[in-house]
Amino acid sequence: MHRPLLMLGLLSSLWTGVALAQPAGVLAKVKSEGTLKVCYAQTTPDAFKDTKSGQWSGVFVDLTNELAAWMKVKVEPVEVTFATVILALNRGDCDLFGASLLYNAPRAMEIDYIIPFAAKGMNAVIAAGNPKHFSRPEDFNQDGVTLAAVAGSRDYEVAKRIFPKAKLIALNTPTDIQLFETVRRGDADAAFANGITIRWWLKAPDHEWATVAFKDDFSTQPNGWAIRYGDPAWKDFLDSFARFALANDRAKELYESYLGRDAGPK
């Protein structure tokens, strides 16, 4: 055999070996195994778990279940916190973060965002009567004000960045609802969450001691799913589903459905 042809044959074999050695992407794995492992962190009304049954519900849980039903695969939920989302995804605990993940640049440097389904702004729970006389978000940025947010959340990142003069408490709580108790106890003057969560929570009974800080939310950011970097086929597939959901206003319909219920979580 001529030397050039021999070299070409060797290179072809090498490339074939490399191609065969490439790990299967998530899409191929899910199709083969019939199971989609989904990480959820509790945030209402996007993804929340019934304490008795362990059943997950919410806007983004419904979107995930719609995708899984269409794919004809089952969902295996994996509970995480917002402080461990990046770690859980990157070490392979799940194939998808299926709860509502709000965009920020530090987080986007570590994990890959899918096309967002919606956008949500921040707001805060404060004591009824507004004893500190907060009238605009800038009023939080002063000495003598204590703020609370869930560790690892968009709200913590934003508060730390734009309210540097205030004291900021990071809580490793599994649910955003537990965060609001810091205001009731007097540990914090305001507790941050997205405006949708706060307004839904305020609909439940026994929350007359609290109110939403502002009529209009601030620091609005897109929210959606996230995956590990390095799997373009999986990202393309999920982006296509997100475009379908956007074209049919699925997230909007689901938010209206949950917010239209008689009361938020207790």
Image (cartoon, grey):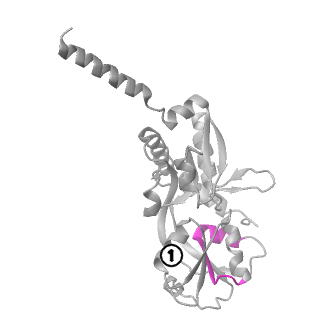
Image quarter (top left, top right, bottom left or bottom right) of the N terminus: top left
In the picture provided, is 216 more to the left or to the right than 174? left
Residue at the farthest front position: 3
Image quarter (top left, top right, bottom left or bottom right) of the C terminus: bottom right
Give the camera-side residue of 150 and 260. 150
Percent across and percent down for residue 51 are 78, 57
Percent across and percent down for residue 262 are 73, 65
Q: Circle 1 sits on which residue?
A: 160
Q: Residue drawn at (45%, 43%), measured in percent from left and top?
A: 235
The residue under label 1 is which amino acid type? Lys
Label 1 crowd (10 A; few <14 / some 14-19 / many >=20): some
Q: Is residue 75 magenta?
A: no
Residue at the farthest right position: 52
Give the camera-side residue of 96 and 218. 96
Give the camera-side residue of 40 and 14. 14
Secondary element at image label 1: helix
Give the camera-side residue of 13 and 77. 13
Percent across and percent down for residue 97 are 56, 50
Q: Is residue 193 magenta?
A: yes
What is the quadrant of residue 149 in the picture? bottom right
Q: Is residue 82 above or below residue 138?
A: above
Task: Give the total number of marks visible in the rendering.
Answer: 1
Which segment did they paint magenta? 186-203
Q: Residue drawn at (47%, 72%), measured in percent from left and top?
A: 219
Q: Is residue 209 above or below residue 62?
A: below
Percent across and percent down for residue 38 are 61, 46
